[in-house]
Amino acid sequence: MAGQRPVTDPEGHVRVGQIVGPFGIKGGLKVVPLTDFPERFDKGSLLYLGGEPFKVVTSYWHKTQARITFDEVRTIEQAEALKWKYLTVPATEKPKLEDDEFLASDLIGLAVVENGEVIGVVDEIVHAPAHDLIRIGDTLIPCVHHFVKSIDLGAKRIVVELIDGMRPGDAAEEVR
């Protein structure tokens, strides 16, 4: 049932949004997108909640949130019970990407290489307002062309060129 919280995301799914609360009294949902593809929330789209498919009946945007409804969620109480749950889609339903675009989930686990030496493995892609960040342990590398020189999914590596202080293990300069 939609009100049951899964312990983990369904196998083979990726998160595309998180329900942050109800809107209105008829079961509307406020969703924070966790995707760069807002069309995932369009009317008629199929989203999964706890592994169960739900078809988006209505959809519109309010600031940075998608406001959606499902036929199966008709009351504010049902919507409230879904707060903090994740909406997912099968990982196989990848949107069309440009040559220099990548899905964050495809980068997790790739080796990060500088000057031919592996400096770490991508733990997470942190979505930040200005640009995404590659997290390697406690180190964050901005995903911008200045630092990220190439991404090769086939070779499972990201080639970077960093400045002093950015590498894992570099000591931060003391501020006086």
Image (cartoon, rainbow, N blue to C red):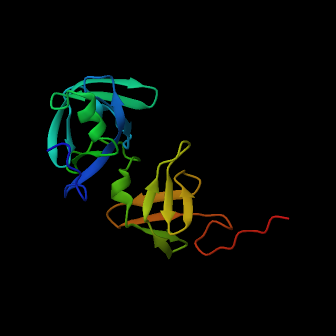
- Locate the C terminus and report the quarter of the image it occupies: bottom right
Q: Position of residue 62 (x, y in %)?
A: 42, 24
- Locate the N terminus and report the quarter of the image it occupies: top left
Q: Position of residue 158 (x, y in %)?
A: 45, 63
Q: Position of residue 170 (x, y in %)?
A: 65, 73
Q: Residue at x 38, y 44 (%)?
A: 34
**Number of numbered tags placed on the structure image:** 0
Q: Residue at x 35, y 67 (%)?
A: 155
Residue sitting farthest toward the front: 77
- As displayed, is residue 144 above or below residue 172? above
Q: Residue at x 28, y 32 (%)?
A: 41
Q: Nearer the viewer, residue 116 or 14?
A: 14
- As displayed, is residue 59 above or below residue 122? above
- As displayed, is residue 140 above or below residue 61? below
Q: Position of residue 105 (x, y in %)?
A: 34, 55
Q: Residue at x 37, y 46 (%)?
A: 99
Left or right? Give the position of 66 relative to 137: left
Left or right? Give the position of 17 relative to 142: left
Q: Nearer the viewer, residue 10 or 156?
A: 10
Q: Nearer the viewer, residue 55 or 92?
A: 55
Residue sitting farthest toward the right: 176
Left or right? Give the position of 145 relative to 29: right
Dividing the picture into quadrants, the one containing residue 129 is: top right
